[in-house]
Amino acid sequence: MEKSEKDILSEIVIDHHENEFRILENGDDAGAHFSLYLPIGSDTKTIQIKILEAKLKKRVIIITTPVGYIGSILR
């Protein structure tokens, strides 16, 4: 069975990030995209490089949030 793009994105984040995160599928005038929420201080550069290497069809928007925001607000 082929992995979905969300599964691939989740694996990338899990492999290169040790804190909480959230992935939401959203859309806007430019089309569908993934919103990847990471706490401030996360190594977003490495994750960004790995996402580009995976050549996902959907855009990925990385949003940094205050520590604790993901667990309390984005349940």
Image: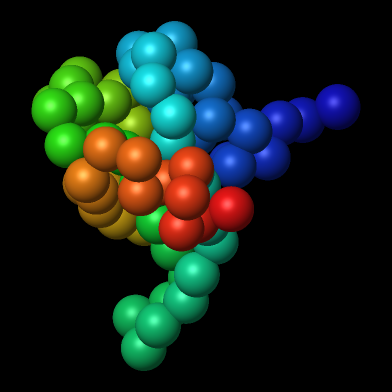
Name the image colouring: rainbow
Residue 49 visible to an observer of this rendering: no
Q: Please state the horizontal and vertical placement of residue 6, each as a whole percent of the image.
A: 59, 42
Q: Is residue 64 above or below residue 48?
A: below
Where on the picture, by quarter, is residue 59?
bottom left
User: Of residues 31 and 75, which is closer to you in this image?
Assistant: 75
Q: Looking at the image, which residue is at 59% across and 53% down?
A: 75
Q: Looking at the image, which residue is at 48% across and 43% down?
A: 71
* Residue 37 in the figure: left or right of residue 25: left
Q: Looking at the image, which residue is at 50% across and 70% down?
A: 26
Where on the picture, by quarter, is residue 48?
top left
Seen from this angle, which residue lies furthest bottom?
Answer: 29
Q: Looking at the image, which residue is at 39% across and 13% down?
A: 18
What is the count of numbered marks? 0
* Residue 2 in the figure: left or right of residue 36: right
Q: Please state the horizontal and vertical placement of residue 35, each as a whole percent of the image.
A: 40, 56
Residue 2 visible to an observer of this rendering: yes
